[in-house]
Amino acid sequence: MINNQSDSEEDVEIALRVLSRGFVDLHQSVRAGEIVDPYSLPQTMGDGMRILSRLCVKAAAEDLGDSVHSLSDIARRLPVGEWGVPQFASPFRFAEAKLLTSEPVAPTEECRALASMGGADGILEGVHHLQLREIVQRVRSQSRLQIYSMLRERIVRKPVYERRELSGFLEDEGIVLADEVMRQWSSDIPLGALRRDGSFAICANCGGLLYPHRDAARFPDGRCKIGPCREEVPSSTARQIVEDAAGWRVFKDDILAYWVGPGLAEIRLYDQLRGGGVDVQLYPRDDAADVGRTHELGIDVKSYACPRLLGDTLSERLGGLTTFDERYVAIPDAIVNRRPGYLEDLRYAYRGAIGVVFGKVSEIAARILG
Amino acid sequence: MRVAPDGFRPALRAQWMACVMHDILGLRSLASAPALFSGYRSIVTHRALAEARVALRNLRLLGVNVESEAHLQEAVTEARAWEEDHSSADDYVEPPFEISTDPGTGFAIRERVRRDDARRAAMLASLLGVLPHDVQKTLPADHTRRFRFRVDGDTGPDVICDTREIATLPAPPETAPEMRERAPISVTIAELEGVARELDEEDARDPTRVPRNFFTRLRSEEGQAVFSVLSPQGAGLAPTDRIELDDVSHMIGLPGAGKSTLIFLLVVLLARRGRRVTLLVPSIEFALALDADLIRYAVPTALLVGQSPDARRRHATRLAERIATLDSGGFGQTAPGAELLGTRCALAGFVSVPPPGFEFPHDRPPCRSLRQAAVNKDGKEGKEGNRLCPLAVACGRQRSSRRLADAAALVHIGHVISTEVVASPHFHTERMREFEMLARTSDLVIIDEVDGAQAALDQKGFAELDLFGSSDSYESILLDDVFDPVASGRGFAVSNSIENYTLASNRFMRLNRGLRAHLLERMVEEGGVLSRFKDAFVTGNSILARMYLDPEVDEEEHGSARFDLIRRLFEQLVRSVSSSWSAPS
């Protein structure tokens, strides 16, 4: 409920957009090696906190705009509608939007969408995507169109890798150019993931790291840090125990948050369709869609918690999906099952002129497989 | 912070000192005033000063701070100057004492009026009485009307704030009443074990918590008591099952003996009984961790932490650095205490007319320096006055002060130095420092790791001057900040003021090097330079006097140019250091 008449839905939405932009900019500075210093925040983060404080004080709610740490903690844990700020709560149409992913922490797709709403600038275009595409452009091979897909798939399937094995893979595929960038995007196995004997565990579900957990009874192998993986398999079991971490690397948090986590549903869908005999590709035509086939069929998997925001975002920008004849937007089953009326609200919020089929990942797969 | 008695003027402080020296102690000069007014507990608690103790304390509470002969001479001269300046006024009444300005007489005191003179008697009576607390006079601005502040105190451009859109603001927290009587604190071991069991059960109910196993710290798995309590009985000690905390002043034990566990359980138990406890610890990090532990068991706490901009910046930066080590450079992370070290002021969201290029001073927000006109009876705006920020009751940056003032926060945790913080004027009607507030409202005060607390207090008590010999020394800073820019011809270094400052700095450097050479020379003398201070009352002044004057020859040459020059330098340095650290940390 909007408590104060002067806070129009539009004002509140602007507040959320500025705040989202702030989180994206703050994340950029952290990626550049800064720490979150409350005394040198990006201008946009400061602006977002200022507007948030105003909303809180006007609504006689607890002020959340004073501490960047407390604020980002709550943004990581809860959708905006549950922050205790009445203006952000239902029926505010983006009440279900979550701004930061739980683990590894990064701005969510929703946050990035909100941050770029109304703006034409390309700062939110994934830096990694551009770097990868640059590598692809430099490859002089007939199969270069497949290289982008191959590298993305490789990253999603094996977020933890042995350096020599990856180098061998890249050499075999004729893309040694990518070796350096893969090294830049990854780091040694963090000390926190190592067990007392120096070994570490790889998650059976997503291939990420399992971190030793203090509740050893519930998580004897450790616990996965990748949020969507934990949603699929809360118990986290090990596929492999690696005795010696030397030579092993793991992709950095933003790759895990932007590609590996959301990529799990994409890979499942891809595997399911391929298994059913549909000749689809991952990230076809330089990532025009998540899963697709030539110009015939394109599927984007979207993990927005807030269907209205997803509807708005797609209405504004459908991206590469417009280049396919049949267009699907698939939502991971867990998200739809958790939130009643998700697909109805998504269809209602989508106002784009181009027809798109919305459905759960399992429904879309079933529909295509016939 | 007390209300000064009628007729008290800082310029006439020497008169009030004379009243203590003459009328209470029967002395005829102010010669010993620097020692008596030093505030050293070893002096003021001496039985010879029993009758003067209250008066000495009262004067110190009024800001009479005479710690050296130079201070004393300044006070006496200032009082004499005041008399001369005002003697021709119609309402002038001669102060009751005549104090010689000649140091040779020890600043002798002569009575001008009889002891039963009404003014002199009133002076004495007020010195021996209880000075009432100063009342907080500044009111919050009316949030239903606009108000303003200036960016740089009084010189910067006006910043207009408009909070009229706020329908209602929360009421300020109810503060804890002064505790005039306190019921004894008596705790049985069985009660402590009961609390330990409760905490263990609470941990067990929450799968995300690591069990702390409090009960097994009191009773072994075989059911044997880990603690045994002995109480004085006659000449010996007898077993008891009860801990009586009244008059307990120390708890000592080997590391791991369970002192901290006992304190923790005791604090939880007392808070659950509604008693008020203050827990002082040696570091802010420890205080934050303890605060988080107690909040975990739903104990209502408040954190005592420095509120000055510098202190907040220091604490918040340290916390941010710690959070950054958790993961992702601190992005999306937090740690206990972050909500109490907020850095952004809510008023920034209500600035309606920002001047060009304005940036809100979050670092030094105008919480106490707003300006708003009063409303006259006829409804028109009258004279503008100083106001407090009306958003303090809602602003996140004030959360810590708000919680500290709230009577519902039963356990106050903090660093011992932070007790010097002045209680927030936004929530208290009396002007008082936290240590006094806590003493008046707490049932129990516990100082954990008392040696660490003492070390922190010691450090606070000393004026430390780093003159040379380190990269933080005055000499090194002058070289970097003044001489190097001048020598390298950097832009700002050509103005007249810089030129003058350079010359002054040059003089300082000469003296500084002289001091160093002198010290080195004296270090090699028999017994070393420190031997002169054996069995002596040591002050900054006496150190200089003893270093520079030969006791056999120079004692009469107090006025020598060399000594005076160095003394002035030293005292100015002491004052600049004192004024920089006397701000609440």
Image (cartoon, coloured by chain):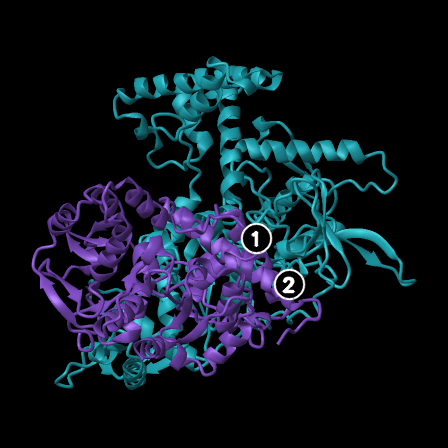
Residue B363 percent across, percent down from the top left: 55, 47
Mark 2 residue element = helix
Of all chains in the rendering, the one displayed in purple is A
- Camera-side residue of B563 and B291: B291
Residue at mark 1: chain: A
Residue highlighted by disc 1? A47
Residue reaching furthest to the right: B378
Q: Position of residue A260 (x, y in %)?
A: 29, 61
Which chain shows up in cyan? B
Q: Which of marks 2 and 1 is in front?
A: 2
Q: Quadrant of residue B185?
A: bottom left
**Disc number placed over residue B290 in the picture, else none:** none
Q: Is residue B324 left or right of residue B438?
A: left
Left/right of residue A220 with respect to residue B51 in the rendered view = left
Q: Mark 2 points at which residue?
A: A11
Marked residue chain, label 2:
A
Pick the front one: B362 or B550 = B362
What whole-number distance in Å separates the C-alpha atoms at marks 2 and 1?
14 Å
| Rendering coords of residue B142 (x, y %) | 75, 62
Q: Is mark 1 on a helix, strand or loop?
A: helix
**Circle 2: residue type:** Asp
